[in-house]
Every structure is written in C-alpha cells, then in structure tokens.
Image (spheres, rainbow, N blue to C red):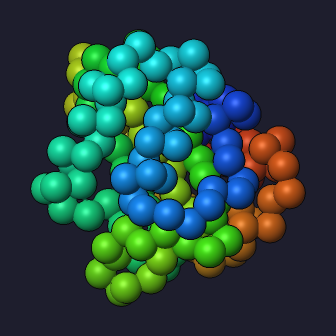
C-alpha cells in the first residue's frame, strides 16, 4: 500500500517557506519536486498548476493550500510540502493565509484516480487540527515524513 510519505521525497520539503506571492510559492514548490528527481519540464508544470488556480483557488482554509497539476512535466506522481510561519495569501474562502502547502504533481496518464486519491487522502487528514499541529511542530523533514507515513495515498 502506497502512503503519502512514499510520494514525498525528504528533499521536497521546505519548513521555512518565505511569505511571498502565491506564484512565488508555486514556483518554489515545483523546484522542490525537481529536487526529488520527478520533474521533467518545469515550465509545463508551472503552467498546469497556474491553470488549475485560475479555475478556482486551491486554498482550502484553516491555513491549508493544496495546489496541483496534471501534466507530463513529471515522470511519476510526486508531492512537495512547504510550511510558512508567516503564511501565504492563497485566496482561501475563510481568508486565512496558507501555512501548510502541499503541491501534487501527476503525469497526465495518472491524472484520474491517482490524483484524486492523493488529494482526498491529504484533505481528510488536514481537516484534523491535531494533524495540522504536528506538521506545524515538525522540526525537520524526517519528522514531516513520519507524520505523513500513516496516510494511505
């Protein structure tokens, strides 16, 4: 059984995302996907994620954003995680700034079930305040990985 942690390389974790624009955060997170070795076309993935944001914000509220893109800019499903103490303005319905940001990138061929399964698994966990608290308290990428290890993808 694949877990969320299996999709998240420890090199794809940034625990000190500087507050900036949503576009800056997206680009940083795509660079984190690149650190995992899954990125094949940075510009294509940026375009896919930004196009998804134009359809509607991926800022969910409660300090969470889950931007995502489906394209052949990655060669396998991959995940990046960033935490921002200051928060990033993401356009969440509740007006909250995003402190916990997960970027999901999947190849076009895996876009259907794989993409939705990852998104649903993350969303189910992130609605729990104690889970968000553990991510906010993690002091290194290994601890983030441990928090996510129990979530099925």
Residue 6 place in picture, x, y as percent: 63, 29
Nearer to me, 88 or 108: 88
Residue 118 seen anywhere in this rendered image of the structure: no
- Answer with the quarter of the image where residue 19 lies: bottom right
Q: Quadrant of the N terminus?
A: top right
| Rendered position, 86 above or below 52 | below
Nearer to me, 62 or 85: 85
Residue 128 seen anywhere in this rendered image of the structure: yes
Residue 72 place in picture, x, y as percent: 29, 17
Residue 93 place in picture, x, y as percent: 29, 81
At 24% from the left edge and 35% from the top edge, which residue is drawn? 47
* Position of residue 51 in the picture relative to residue 91 (left or right): left
Nearer to me, 18 or 118: 18
- Answer with the quarter of the image where residue 32 lies: top right
* Position of residue 51 in the picture relative to residue 137 (left or right): left
* Position of residue 52 in the picture relative to residue 152 (left or right): left
């Amino acid at each position: 059984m694949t877990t969320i942690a299996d999709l998240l390389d420890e090199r794809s974790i940034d625990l000190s995302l500087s507050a900036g624009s949503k576009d800056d955060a997206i680009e940083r997170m795509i660079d984190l996907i690149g650190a995992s070795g899954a990125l094949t076309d940075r510009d294509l993935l940026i375009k896919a994620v930004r196009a998804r944001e134009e359809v509607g914000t991926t800022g969910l509220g409660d300090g969470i954003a889950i931007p995502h893109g489906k394209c052949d800019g990655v060669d396998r499903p991959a995940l990046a995680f960033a935490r921002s103490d200051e928060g990033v303005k993401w356009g969440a319905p509740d007006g909250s700034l995003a402190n916990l940001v997960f970027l999901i990138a999947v190849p076009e061929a895996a876009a259907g079930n794989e993409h939705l399964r990852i998104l649903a698994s993350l969303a189910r966990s992130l609605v729990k305040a104690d889970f968000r608290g553990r991510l906010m308290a993690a002091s290194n990428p290994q601890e983030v990985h441990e928090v996510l290890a129990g979530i099925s993808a």
